[in-house]
Amino acid sequence: MTNSFDDVRSRLRAGDIPGAVRSLRPLADTAPLRDLTDEVRALAEAVGFDDLARAAKKASRKPGDAQRLYDFGYLCIERGLAFPAIPALREALRLSPGARPVLSELVAAFEAEDRHAEAAAVLLRHEAVLEPWPGGYLLAYNSLLAGDLATGRDRTARLPEPADSTWAWAHERLRGMVSRAEAASRTAPLDRTDLRGWQFALTGTLLGTLSPYGFEVMTGRYAYFGDSYGACRRGLDRLATALDIAGHRPTAVSALPGRSDRILALAAADLLGLPLEPYAPGRPGTLVVAYDLSDHDPEVLAELRDRAPGQVLYEHASRWTEPAAVPADFSTLQRQVGSEPWGEQLGAEGRGPADSRPEAEIARDIVTADPSADPGDGEGPVDGEAAFRDFVTAIAPLWLTSGSRAPINSTGPVQSNRF
């Protein structure tokens, strides 16, 4: 096993901390705990996490001590390094069966790593010791994020009303997820490739388009996406279709503060035949337009957490690896990184300058663009208009409902490759 850590150590000596972490990740679940804690200790010392380094040192000396393993795992999670916490906490739970604090931290580590099926499985094995709040809630929640609608639905139905009102939001979120999943399942498979179905079920976001490239590894998401005017127009056309089917008619369009937001808002106002108004928090009946919500100040996003009556939040390009603090009601596409059609463009001779034309001129290019779908590589399902309309018809009664826009910091059951 020592040789397996050679790459971790060489990267650490070179000062490449992110590279060392990436090299350690695939080794964590199978490495002896003493070796794993030694490597984490070296990482912690390199970045000045003295508390984690001390905990790792103690756990390394006595890897059969449940308390030391718990302390190590807890600090790993606190320091944003959840994956080495999992084997340590798993062993701590074996050494102290049914210990709720250990179980809770192990579930937190699984959640941080998007390993929801494993979180649900360990909760099921210890269901006898779970209290409804938060234990029963975590079981239902992780079951849904793992794609297990049957268990998620069943455990949500079993949950009593929380005695502590601070859990009321979580109860409402679970019931909303189950209701949306049941609506989506009328026309969508809700399997591990159904990105649109699960995106709506988990967040209430209606996903306008799916990537037609590399479906086997990306399942409808983009890794890098160089945007186009046609893609912007196609997203707005799908939004118009969804609003029409849902019978919802905004009274105006407003843009979040940003050049790209204003360009899209101008195009949306033109295509939907609506007036353009300045953005104001809490303004009812307006279509709020953003190019990428992740680009915005947390204070602006906090204003959008609770829907104003009749308000629709539209986002063109959602950053699925770093989801915004507020999910949009409608998102055209999901990408990891990319560039706007009017932004700096990467070409054979490096980056070209951004388009400096007036915003109204660029918006006109969106309005007049060809909205035809990119045929892609032909390996994935066809993202046709009929299927999109059927899906919107099935979920329309639950789309744009009142209440809070609750974020989910997880990709859910549908996984995609990252780079």
Image: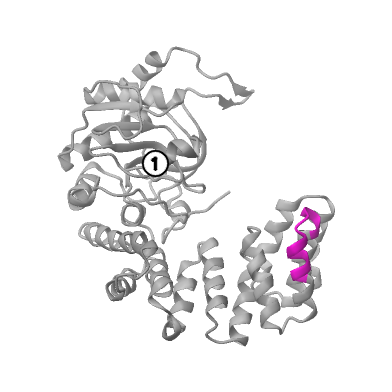
Q: Amino acid at mark 1?
A: Leu
Return the x and y of residue 289 as percentages of the image width and height: 35, 31
Q: How is the image coloured?
A: one colour
Left or right? Give the position of 234 relative to 52: left
Kind of element beneath mark 1: strand
Residue in the image at 52% along x and 71% along y: 107
Q: Is residue 50 magenta?
A: yes
> Up-down: is 1 above or below 222?
below
Q: Quadrant of the image for the N terminus?
A: bottom right
Mark 1 residue crowding within 10 angstroms, few (<14) / some (14–19) / many (20+): many
Which residue lies under the disc numbered 1?
Answer: 333
Left or right? Give the position of 83 relative to 380: right
Residue 211 falls in which quadrant of the image?
Answer: top left
Q: Is residue 90 visible?
A: yes
Residue in the image at 22% along x and 58% along y: 183
Left or right? Give the position of 112 relative to 393: right
Q: Is residue 51 magenta?
A: yes
Return the x and y of residue 171 as percentages of the image width and height: 33, 64
Q: Which residues are magenta?
A: 45-56
